[in-house]
Amino acid sequence: MQLINPELKVDFLGKRKLAMIFSGILLLLSLGLVAGKGLNFGIDFTGGTLVEVKFKEAPAIADVRKALTPAGYGQAIIQEFGAPEEILIRVQNQDSSDSSKISTDILDALGVGLGADNVEMRRVEFVGPQVGEELTQAGIFAVLFAMIAILIYVTFRFKLRFAIGADAALLHDITILVGVFALTGKEFSLPVVAAILTVIGYSLNDTIVVFDRIRENFDFNRKRKHPDDEVDVVNGSINQTLGRTLMTSLTTLLVVLSLFFFGGEVIHDFAFALIIGILVGTYSSIYIASPVMLSLEGRFETSDEEREKLEARP
Amino acid sequence: MQAYPRWKLWLILIVLVVSAMGTLPNLTTPPSWWPSVVSQPMNLGLDLKGGIHLVIDVNVEKAVEHSVEEDVDTIRRVLRENKIRYRKLDADGKTLIVQLKNDSDSAAAETLLKKEMPGYTTVAEAGRFTLTISETEAKEIKKFAVDQSIEVIRNRVDALGTTEPVIVKQGERRILVQIPGYEDSARAKGLIGRTALLEFKLVDEKGDLEKALSGKIPQGDIIVYGKAEDRGGKMLRQPYLLKKRTELSGAEVADARVSIDSQYNEYAVTLKFNNKGARKFDKLTNAHVGERFAIILEGVVQSAPVIRERIAGGTAQITGSFTSQDARDLAIVLRAGALPAPVKVVEERSIGPSLGQDSIEQGMNSIIYGCIAVLIFMVVYYRLFGLVANAALIFNMLLIAAAMSMIGSTLTLPGIAGIVLTIGMAVDANVLIFERIREEIRLGKTRLAAIDGGYDKALSTIVDANITTLIAAIVLFQFGSGPVKGFAVTLSVGILASMFTAIMVTRAIVAFSIEKKSSKELSI
């Protein structure tokens, strides 16, 4: 079976202007959303308390709120989590008292208001203000560090302009992924940062496969009497790897969808981030990485001396 | 096609056998003769097993301040022994200030202080000394405070009777506490978080409490309040005027047990002092019959009974309208000893047992469904070669399970996500190879040459692509916390395993099935 007709020759790069405009709009939209609407940061970053409880009988949200009010948490964010019996309660850190005790107060209040036998603790998460700041820092560091490490590796294995193309694609993917989180208002938590790093790895994986083929074809092309234009070589390379690109995206998408549908509420957002990341990552490895790399033609590299050396190779 | 090297076959066979053996303990209890290296099942993380996860911050600055305060006594003693009189002697945060009565003593005092207080830098100016604790000394005290806190917390957690709690230092001043299989987060936090500082001080019976409350506290006295009590809708706190000096402390307690107070028929905690404490208590009660002594727990006066007679037995009782749980926990913390500095819970991630069980089920489901989907897809798309890739994929799963069990790493929910993702990415190497073989065939190569070409040309791509993913996984491991680390581990293990299975194992299978088959067409 074939997904892609091997004879197929799509002029991907011919449409690169269009793709650039499309991506540009998406990027601007994403940045606008993040700046305007903002991200719904989870307690990992803002600090706060999250309590997940399971009731024997599904309660009305209003009743849960009523039970929490005497304890002073009437303003808490209360929502259903996956099933009507499961409720998620979120409270911000308080300056005055020891915030680590909030979860205890909440569980006690629920027990008093709705019956202790009816309430089961599923999960308690508390992140102190200091830790929240540290996790934010660590998250930003991680993304930056990964990008730098990749820049170095790709420069070492390929060339600087390939590395810049790869990082441009990554930046593109991350920005749009974050933009989607701003748009949907889904919680931006630590696992989502983990998903971003995974998307970095994945998107890069895709890009590298295309680059690898481009490098191979460049070498081949240079040895020919009448070398083709770089654009044509790149276009050919993208077409040659298209079957694999789509195939791998499909298999990965299959498992991530399985995670999304069967993995449970706790990793739902994580799986969601991966799905978006895979889609955007596949697109960017075709339409962003290579065009950016091409647009840097002649910069940063191959002095004539080096080229002669290459040409002298048997 | 070149002959497939023998040693590679053996390697594959050995890895297969070891992986199968390493995976077995996860499915069933292995027989007794089973080698111990491969007999450990995977560790499950708290998010799968359920339990309490706390990160505790030790207020090490307080420990330093406390130590500086204690040195006031040292200086007092040293100066007195050398007959140097002082006007003022005080601790202020990290510094001690000594003001001499006679400037003429300055030289003697300076030599003395420098000799006796080596952990401080001493600055002298006209009969006044400022001693600042040195960085190294402060660091030492901080480290000691954290280490000692770990000991105390371990004693307290052990008293809960759970199996295999984890209590380790995290960074400079934090302590990670994990109590698997325990769900009473409130009690755990209560037990771990209290300083359990117990002090016995005499009540200043001659002092005027009213005057002291208006601000005129007699020299050497302090005001300490009792527990808040609700009387007719008003919260009242009973103030006590006490001697500043601590006569006895929790450090001299050898044992603490729950008891019933015979007088009020209430829960109480009976303390038993160690030898030194018993002697002190004996002397104290002997010398102050008819006076009161206050029992102060964590800065709050629990009770201030009158000493009716000399108490020689070395026991004392703490009362305070406790519930049975209160009394039990108080006994636990008093037995375990006081924390050297106040602590605070700065992070908690506790999981109830039912959520852990659900997560395992859902995680396994997503692995199974994801795996089936990929297996079917590969066969439909690559036919016979798809089967080969599938065999490698199953081998890969086996290898991951065995590696995780053998290196003793912990499987978390994000870790399961990592495995699921690996399934999708593991076949990528085979996709690369197979697509390349198809290309070679289209170029008109013979089937054996096409297979060789496909594997050879795809190799560098596979290595490059996987190393970059590995870089991301390593960064994730470095910066991630807790469960996220688990994801990085399974992802890394999965990538490495997939490179082995997708390249080596499929090649071996292909090499053998091709030699035997005679058909001209490749089923790809």
Image (cartoon, coloured by chain):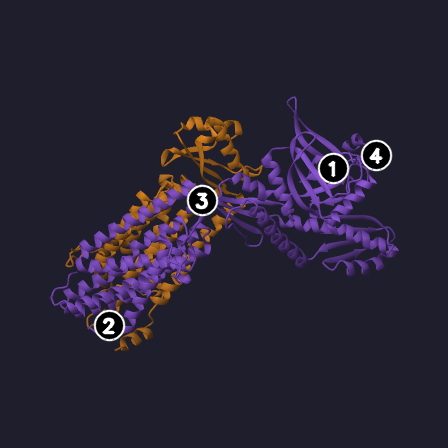
Chain colours: A orange, B purple
Would you place residue B164 above or below residue B462 in this image?
above
* Mark earlier in primary sequence (4, 1): 4
Respond whether the residues carrying marks 2 and 4 are from the same subunit: yes
| Label 2 residue SS | loop
Alpha carbon of mark 2 to alpha carbon of mark 4: how far? 99 Å
Which disc, if any, is residue B50? 3
Mark 3 crowdedness (10 Å alpha carbons): few <14, some 14-19, many ≥20: many
**Image position, residue A244 (x, y; %):** 23, 58
Respond whether the residues carrying marks 1 and 3 are from the same subunit: yes
Number of callouts in the render? 4
Which disc, if any, is residue B500? none
Would you place residue A236 above or below residue A50 in this image?
below
Q: Amino acid at mark 4?
A: Lys
Which disc, if any, is residue B206? 4
Q: Disc 3 or disc 2, which is closer to the eye?
A: 3
Respond whether the residues carrying marks 4 and 3 are from the same subunit: yes
* Mark earlier in primary sequence (1, 3): 3
Alpha carbon of mark 1 to alpha carbon of mark 3: how far? 42 Å
Would you place residue B300 above or below residue A168 in this image?
above
**Image position, residue B194 (x, y; %):** 61, 42
Q: Which residue is labeled 2 in the image?
A: B4
Q: Is residue A84 visible?
A: yes
* Mark earlier in primary sequence (2, 4): 2
Q: Is residue A74 left or right of residue A264?
A: right
Q: Amino acid at mark 1?
A: Ala
| B295, B314: nearer the viewer | B314
Alpha carbon of mark 4 to alpha carbon of mark 3: how far? 57 Å
